[in-house]
Image (cartoon, helix red, strand yellow):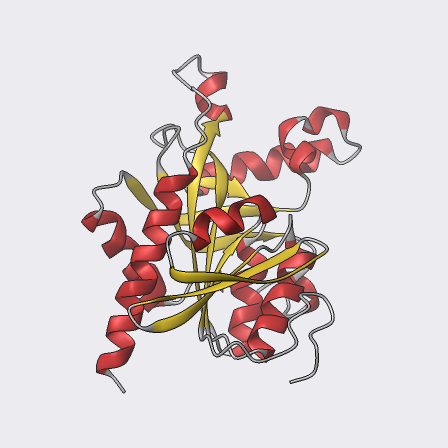
Amino acid sequence: MDKLYHIGLEENPGAEYAILPGDPGRVEKIAKYLDNPIFLNKNREYTTYIGSLNGRNVLVTSTGIGGPSTAIAVEELYQAGVKTFIRVGTCGGMQTDVLSGDLIIASGAVRMDGTSIQYTPIEFPAIASHDVAWAMAEAAKRLDKRHHIGVVQSKDSFYGQHSPERMPSGFELQNKWDAWIKAGALASEMECATLYIVCSMLKARCGAVLGTVWNQERAKMGLSNPEVHNEADAIECAVEAVKILIDKDKLSE
């Protein structure tokens, strides 16, 4: 295998599973949940560790923020042999029953990113792999984590969401935001749509579990809305889901 230009891996790590946080600072935290974690490489926003779960190698690689860097990470990890990708991240709630600290298992994503449209036309849906979404839901149940399963909104502009009135395209942003809420979108984040579309093209498995930091819709209504940074719940859910998938995959071999 030639050296992968962005993530910097020079040898095939022999891992078919990858956990993908956005923040490089979370990689080592996640790696501690693996057996025998080893640092592999750091380049730009991409930090990679390898370890094992239930006897199979698992990579943890950060993707940075947003679609472009996520697509690069997935493309290059796929070249390195990864076939199952699970994003672990954060989100902001959109439905009033989504509380700070809740987990969101993203079954699909609204494609408001700019990267996925350079892979497939906008009419093609961004959806998680059924068995990965099932494994994450099962993991959340086993761990007794409060969670929701459904569609998230993937955007490219954090501040376009939080202060659309400042933007020349604010009218469109606000109207679409209201539409996604009426349609039932659970939360807003920045990577799922790209991950799902790239994996669909590559014929790879994918899914995502997100920790809810806050909910601006609850704040607008004067409801309780503490800011919660509880990344451990999402990490534990992702790790348990990988174990479930590994055991399931072993049975089909």
Which residue appears farthest toward the top when viewing the image? 222
Residue 179 is left or right of residue 54, and the answer is right
Q: Which quarter of the figure has residue 184? A: top left
User: From the image, which quarter does the N terminus lie in?
Assistant: bottom right
Q: Does 28 appear above or below 231? A: below
Residue at image location 69% in from the left, 29% down from the top: 164
Q: Nearer the viewer, residue 121 or 135?
A: 135
Q: Position of residue 235 (x, y in %)?
A: 39, 48
Residue at image location 47% in from the left, 27% down from the top: 214
Q: Which quarter of the figure has residue 130? A: bottom left
Q: Position of residue 121 (x, y in %)?
A: 64, 68
Circle count? 0
Q: Position of residue 227 (x, y in %)?
A: 46, 23
Residue 211 is left or right of residue 159, and the answer is left
Q: Position of residue 23 (x, y in %)?
A: 58, 46
Residue at image location 34% in from the left, 63% down from the top: 242
Residue 124 showing in the rendered view: no
Q: Nearer the viewer, residue 63 or 15?
A: 15
Residue at image location 68% in from the left, 40% down from the top: 157
Q: Nearer the viewer, residue 110 or 205?
A: 205
